Image: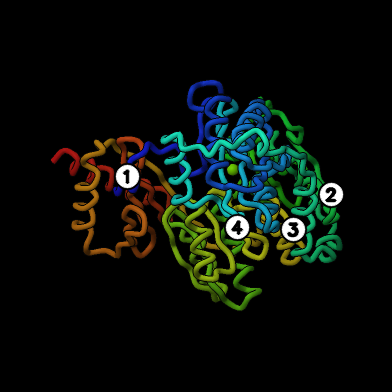
Amino acid sequence: MTQRNVVPRLFGTNGVRGVVNTKAMDCRFASRLGMAIGTFMNGTILIGSDARTSGEMLKAACSSGMMATGCDVLDCGVLPTPALQYSVKMDKEIAGGVVITASHNPPEFNGIKCVDRDGTEMARKNEEDIETIFHGKAFNVTTWDKIGSSTPHARAIPDYEKAIISLIDADSVRAEGLKVALDCSNGAGARVTPHILERLGVDYVTLNADLNGAFPGHNSEPTPDNARDLTELVRQGDFDLGIIHDGDADRTIFVDDKGNYMHGDRSLAIAAYYACKENSGGLVVTTVGSSKCVEDAVKMAGGRIMFTRVGSPVVARAMIKNNAIFGGEENGGLIFPRLQYCRDGAMAVARLIEIVAKHGEMSKIQAMIPAYSQYKTKTSCPNEKKEAVMKRLAENAREERIDATDGIKILFDDGWVLVRPSGTEPIIRIFSEAKSSDKAKDTAGRFRDIIAQAVEE
Ligand code: MG
């Protein structure tokens, strides 16, 4: 692992996260980070939050830090992360964006996430610049007469909704008279997705559609367990689709018309399939952690696939660079380049509904895409031994096909195993996929034993 800068890292894969009103994420921290962000962005900044109880406090503190450096702040209120990203992208006068969100974490957490000028999640290099300013206290604090202003900004949501609808064949959707069940997880998706359904003429029933940072319905990660009420509702009623967002609605997980929870790989594969079909081919980008069903779907539709390291900013940037027609992660984060290069929960809803309207029941569409079983496990490994263990694994696996894009992925004829050292904890993660659940478990176990032995040596 290379250490590019010597200052301690603040930003994780999805912004800075911490438990609210501890040193890691209190109003003092937020205002200091705001000063660092303002010093870096040096212009007008859009800010918004998800529905957490601490959202308003941290937004005010972060805004105050940014204003101290002379930045004007436009306050978008509570909104989905991709709605803010779209606004940043569309307005060339905007220097960047900030979202106060901890996405799917438990309610006591919150986070501060930065958005680059082009609307994408902030590149690591820019985060490092902010970290350097923060730790060096190199804040560009201005004089009394140049303090920034804060103004409410109500346009972000309607502009975003309009842009989504413009990319959908709304007449075809309306003609089908579809009915869906929507679980907003008490999060920011409640601000947008019901409007999208109304504008598409889709009848809907909601669960947890009030903004409530205590998450009384369930925690805001759309796991099978948290989606239990939704799957039950879909099973008992006459619905064409179930929909569940994470807390900041950049991700969406679907339930088919039979009430089957669809893992994120499945919706990714289906959206990829139709993107390639409609485009007569094209490139789809996803991470090495995605199921082979995505590759299968892309190939079935005459497209090409490219695998990247794990992380949605990596996928988004590879999509831009290689002119991809579609991309995303296996966790329900789908990226639609015609709208913007970021995970987009409401766009995913509109697009999957359009697919059902045009191509029939989701359970039948699902049946067309090959299915695999996955298994995840881990083993402990001291940080200083990780490199040697990974090297040894690569040498020993030379018989098979190896992809070293992120960790080591060993490809077999009917599946794969992905071995990745954790960036923060003294563990190595093992993730396998095969045609049967027994095979996936066996393979993961076999590699766990090999790695555990290599750690001992
Ligand atoms: Mg999220």
Mark 2–mark 4 distance (CA, rounded to whole Å): 35 Å
Judged left or right of residue 144, residue 40 is left
Q: Earlier in the sequence, mark 2 or mark 1?
A: 2
Could you tell me the amino acid type at mark 3? Ile
Helix, strand or loop at disc 2? Answer: strand
Who's the residue at 32% across and 59% down the image?
A: 404
Q: Position of residue 140 (x, y in %)?
A: 53, 39
User: Which three-letter amino acid code belongs to the residue tagged 1?
Assistant: Pro
Q: Nearer the viewer, mark 2 or mark 4?
A: 4
- Would you say the residues marked 4 and 1 are in contact, meaning their CB atoms lie under 8 Å apart? no
Mark in front: 1 vs 3:
3
Q: List the residue tagged with mark 2.
A: 203
Query: Farthest top residue?
Result: 21
Q: CA distance from mark 3 to mark 2?
A: 18 Å
Q: Quadrant of the C terminus?
A: top left
Q: Earlier in the sequence, mark 1 or mark 3?
A: 3
**Mark 1 residue element:** strand
Q: Residue at x 58, y 47 (%)?
A: 42
Determine the quadrant in which ligand 1 lies.
top right
Whether residues under marks 1 and 3 lie with C-beta atoms below 8 angstroms apart, the answer is no
Identify which residue, 359 or 321, lies in the foreground.
321
Question: Where does label 1 land, which residue?
Answer: 421
Q: Position of residue 71 (x, y in %)?
A: 64, 42
